[in-house]
Amino acid sequence: MNKLDLAKWTQNFAKKQGANDTSVVISNSRSIDVEFRDGNIDKLTEATENSLSIELYAGGKYSSHRTNDLRKPALQKFVNNALAMTKYLGEDPFQALPDPELYKGRPEMDLQLFDANYHQVETKERVANARQIFERIDGKDNRIVSVTSNFSDSHYENIHLKSNGFEGSYENSTFGAGAEVSLDDGSGKKPQSWRYYSTRHLKDLPDLNMIADEALKRTQDSVGQDKIESGSMSMILPNDQGRGLLGRMFGALNGGNLQQKNSYLDGKLNTKICSDLLTIVDDPTIIRGMGSRYYDGDGVAAKVMPVIDKGVLKNYYIDVYYGRKLEMTPTSGGTSNVTFAPGKRSGAEIEKDMDRAILVTGFIGGNANTTTGDFSLGVSGWLIENGVRTKPINEMNISGNYSDVLNQLIEIGNDPYQYSSWRTPTLVFDGIQFAGL
Amino acid sequence: MSDYSRRDFLKVTGSGLALASLSGVLPGIMGCATTKEVQSALFTRFGIDTETIRKVLSEALVYGGDYADVFFENTISNSIRLEDRIVNSASTSVQLGVGIRVLKGDQTGYSFTEDLNLESMKKAARTAANIAQGSKTIPPQEFKPMNLPNYYPVNVSWESIGIDKRVEIVKSLDSEVFAEDSRIIKNYVGFTDSEKYILVANSEGLLSTDYQPMLRVIVYCTAEQDGERESNYFDYSMRDDISFLTPDRLARMPKEAVARTVKLFDAKSAPAGEFPVVLTPGSSGILLHEAIGHGMEADFNRIGTSIYADKLNTKVAPEFVNIVDSGLNPSLRGSINVDDECYDSKETFLVENGILRTYLHDRISAKHYGVDPTGNGRRESFKHYVMPRMRNTYMLNGPHTQEEIIGSVKYGILADQFTNGQVNIGPGDFTFYVKSGSLIEDGKITAPIKDVNIIGNGPDVLEKVSMVGNDFAMTEGGWTCGKNGQSVPVSHGLPSVLVSSITVGGKG
């Protein structure tokens, strides 16, 4: 039975057994991952998965369930048990399927989320790719302790059916390649770093030799890292690091956190929350974008949405459930592609002009409090003096409150990152509190 | 593999963990069932017999692998959530499948199937078999069942507890949170239980079975005072049945959650720079997990990438420091009766009287080093290969009292609630996030502090453990360790400890 037929059968069965409404997702995926180390395949993993999720709305009550046993007798029992359990819950007037009007207006273009060549990729080629990355690094530096390279790909398909008329399906592919390198710098420490890229289409991956070179360079750059004096300094975030700072701040834009009073941005819609330089648009329609989509988890049609316009907060991420609770129109339950209005200069040009700053090339640990906006994050990178990288640093920390720090943004680059749903350009902040010695 | 999956981290488990129930009751899996009865019940559950296993292993070894194993798993989880005073959603999840692994030297071939018919299993076995490229190895004719102790016996299965009972507990916790303090404006309660049934058989003819229960309850509340808001939580997680939730424990949850939250209104931000840090007993064991635990996992040492590689039997800490990783602690979240590749669970000394003693091994690394396995071979599920993973990691009592320890600090930080941590294995730098603590001034606890990350270097910090208290405690919370994209439940503990100097990431 195909997925659509099985989804319809499950929906009909659940309704016959007493559900008022249902939302059913059936998905299957296949992924293959090759890890290469010391001249050999270290791990070869192949995964094929199936899953059925059903949300039940029954008598004003709501529950959600997932199983990987898709045989009909097992599903019947599964749905019956799920319905039985739902009876014991409290009625929640806000739990219901979305207004079907929200389903309308999906992007009509082909987002090209699936690489038609996916099925032509053979494991021989995967191994050859992982080997190429490994061999490019192996022997390039006599301090190398270990090189592990990786090539992986996956194919995901799903069908989504809601009992009030929503029907959607999509498939996507993901290709990934990267390497992790460890060096022995003679001090007893084993500096390590890595580089990993992922794309929807195979031919969009960067040159494998370049990935390998970057992984090695990053590791070499981390030799001799140490902490320096604590103090307030400028901070440069390269384009692949912006999410490390801003990702947690986006938690405060989430409808659930707003409604549960766990957001420092509660009540701040259409007010200035950060520097004029910051304009952020959530754009689900980027061709081959890692976060691109036709509709969100609620089935709400994907739309381009301004989030921050010249420092002014324009939209929260409101899903259907919390939209009802907050009496707000649903926007979307979560980020698609987070895009930024670019500045004028590249990261490299900006770096050359900095008198004294820390270039953060990695985050480690830390957390943020969405209720208050406080954050505290471990960092490593470089001390920049007079435009030159003078000292590699690590074991340092940045702390602040997003309400302050986002107003300290002084420049934004013209170099958005292409290999993530977070397409951040280089970001430069003034007066960041670094803790070290 | 995502950008982040290669990183190792530890965090308090999110409330989204999951789901639900309800296949047939398995008689005799708990309580006083014999090993044979348990195995027989699991054979029935998975619809297999030893002949099936032999055929699958035979296929797995068709190209001459050195070793193969099959890992059958059925996990059933239930979760209910309360928000805005209503138990307004429930989730259930059923996972069923078998993972097939083939080893050739240090190389791993791995595949799995969710379909437990012989043909599907043989197909997956042949995929995993491809890691080897030789002629057929012969599988065992018979399997020897392992007789194992039970470190988490339960009297009642979660499957037999009605949802109504869970609903009653959750509603009662919610009422008590609001009764506790008028500043509470929002409260969330999550109740998750799961039961994992495992059967592992390998090409050496060993066969192990396990039943792993898990409970987690969390209360997360938000308070408002003079226009300011703060949130905090309290949680329990154990391998136990519903009897763990005694009236005393249930009464403590709302009190602790509220006290932790309203305390934050008085909190100042922490200073920035290097300071002495006192860790209070319990969840501060996160220090060990990050500073030494991951670095002692033998996969990193086998390939030479850990900062602890080549440091066995050297002095790494003062002689009153003893650090253990154990799977044997009754009902703790990280306890296991047997690891996921048929090795007995054990108590393993990472550090004994200040000397670095034993790495944490899985099968590959134990063979590589030619040492006895330590029972640390774990995997998230049948979809994942085995790696050396921690279980319950803790420091034993030392010679000092908490009063002496705090009294010795002129100006520093007392850290007592933690949410997450991370480590870079090679250079050894690690972090842990302090949700709540206090300043220590002139040997006395003064103002509360909040939301500060602490960052240090593993071996450096172990050397700087200058005092160890006699008040050891384990964390009670639901900690989940992530490594290479796999999550497993763990626990950790510590007595009061003074680290003489470490970087505190405050706002200055």
Image (tube, helix red, strand yellow):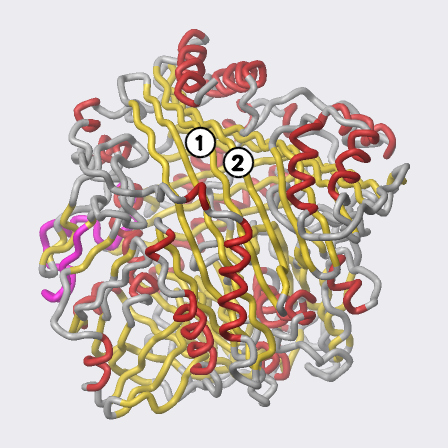
Near mark 2 (Cα within 10 A), the count class, few <14, some 14-19 or many ≥20, is some
Which image quarter: residue B2?
bottom left
Question: Can you see residue A52?
Answer: yes
Q: Does A167 appear above or below B458? A: above
The outermost residue toward the top is A16
Residue position for label 1: A27
Secondary structure mostly taken by the magenta-highlighted segment of the chain: loop
Q: How far is disc 2 from disc 1 in space, using C-alphas?
A: 8 Å
Q: Position of residue B348 (x, y in %)?
A: 77, 64
Q: Position of residue B220 (x, y in %)?
A: 42, 46
Left or right: B36 in relation to A270:
right
Q: Tell which of A221 and B25 is nearer to you.
A: A221
Q: State the mark number for residue A49.
A: 2
Give me the chain letter of mark 2: A
Report the residue at 79% width, 33% height from top. B55
Q: Which residues are magenta?
A: A259-281
Q: Tell which of A193 and B277 is nearer to you.
A: A193
In terms of sequence position, does the residue under pointer 2 or pointer 1 come before the other? 1
Q: Tell which of B127 and B156 is nearer to you.
A: B127
Which kind of residue does numbered mark 2 sit on? Glu
Q: Tell which of B308 and B25 is nearer to you.
A: B308
Report the residue at 77% width, 40% height from top. B57
Which kind of residue does numbered mark 1 sit on? Ser
Residue B224 among those drawn in magenta: no
* Total numbered labels: 2
Left or right: A71 in relation to A237:
right
Q: Position of residue B49 (x, y in %)?
A: 80, 27
Q: Does B166 appear above or below A199? A: above
Q: For numbered disc 1, what is the local secondary structure?
A: strand
Disc 2 to disc 1: CB gap under 8 Å: yes
Left or right: B109 in relation to A77:
right
